[in-house]
Amino acid sequence: MVPAPAPPWSPEPPLHSVNPDTSLAQLFAQRPFVRFWLARTGGTMANQMLMVALAWHMYALTSSAWDLGLVGLFQFVPALLLTLPAGHLADRLHRGRMYACCMFGQACAAGLLLGASHWNLSSRALLLGVAIVLGAARAFQMPTQQALTPQLVPASLLPRALALSAGAMQLAIICGPALGGLLYAQGVSTVYFCCALLFLGAAALTIRVQYRHQPSQAAVSWASVFAGVRFVWSRKVIMGATSLDMFAVLLGGATALLPIYARDILHSGPMGLGVLRAAPAAGALLMSLLLLRWPLTQRVGPKLLLAVALFGLATVVFGLSTDFRLSLMALAISGAADNVSVVIRATLVQLDTPDAMRGRVSAVNSIFIGASNQLGEFESGSVAALCGPVFSVVSGGIGTVLIAAAWCGLFPALARRDRLS
């Protein structure tokens, strides 16, 4: 009989018994994780800069809330179609190389926009076409990056690794939009050029990430591709956590309408748009630092539901505000609440999923995330086109609060969940 392969990490103590200072030092000693952490940070910053430039570029060309929504929809459709096959590939292929290819593809998209803007060839159709390319690239990127992180750190360090990753992502989301708005004032070509460089740098870093690659032995079939869906459906805690995020941000996300608020309601211009895009990330970054030092270990289910409800209330305040400072504060609070949701959900999914299934389960999780972001942008834009931006944001925030209340009864196992592991 062939012995089972040794696990990549030695048995770990319970999550709540690890000394915080020691575990942080151990986390930064994991060089593959640190290298991938830097790559994700650079790639996220580039993506945020690109999204700010693309949204403002589209609104400058068409002045249409509908077209802003279409940018999100055209990213969501290829992600919806490709994410499940991408998750299957993430369980079979080297995840680091897959992620590097995704970064390179987005660098090519930024280069195409750079050339079009330089030679005055930009058009509504071109921007929507690039949105399709970006959606396809992110369909492979999201499950790959989610499934790769648990292979780079021991299980006892995973909650802090995810909190640190979330903090770095939020820092990139703060700097990315603000830098994107600042560079846009120098010309849209400048933004696209910087995005291409950052994507290429992220690809180069990820190529050097090494880990023990154990490809899934599942046969290539539709049953294997959809195995992640069946797994999530059978685990009600995972199903409740991921669907809660999808419906909450689907209703409560106001990101697609920030160009309208920046130009027509708050009168802050493209630099103001960058600051508004960065405000949720600022709140999320502060929360990430708190969670890195004091990770959530008890009553995680009730805290998840409470965080989503707070996210909805902050969205309502932002929708009604006409003061720039109050709007920034509301967005920061929404970002902090959303970060609590992200860390709890990501940790629950990774700890409750065996490694051989992580790519496919992460693909399902990515569909939920894509729906809550890209499809949410389309929902916000279409409702704003019919009823106005204020109604779209306020009604979505109220809907988010109602969703959090409903999930208490629909998923009692999630509402009663005490510990992450």
Image (cartoon, grey):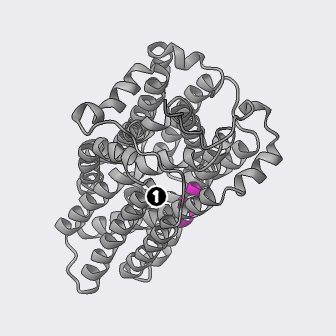
Residue 232 falls in image quadrant: top left
Q: Is residue 254 visible?
A: no
Q: Is residue 172 part of the magenta span, yes or no?
A: yes
Magenta region includes residue 182: no
Viewer-side residue, 170 vs 209: 209
As drawn, 416 above or below 115: above
Farthest residue in the left direction? 125
Seen in the picture, residue 403 relative to 150 is either above or below; the reply is above
Look at label 1 and name its amino acid: Gly
Q: Describe residue 56's horizontal placement relative to residue 300 as left or right.
A: left
| Residue at the image point whose x is 23% and y is 86% from the top | 119
Outermost residue, bottom side: 119
Q: Identify the residue under disc 1.
A: 96
What secondary structure is the stretch in magenta mostly built from? helix
The residue at the point 53 percent across, 15 percent down is: 413
Quadrant containing the C terminus is top right
Crowd tier of the residue under label 1, counting other residues whose Cα lies within 10 Å: few below 14, some 14–19, many 20 or above: many
Location of residue 227 in the rendering, given as x and y in whole percent from the top left corner: 33, 30
Task: State whether residue 299 appears in this view.
Answer: yes
Q: Residue at x 30, y 41 (%)?
A: 84
Would residue 369 appear left or right of 211 to someone viewing this image? Answer: left
The range drawn in magenta is 168-175
Please give the count of numbered marks on the rendered protein. Answer: 1
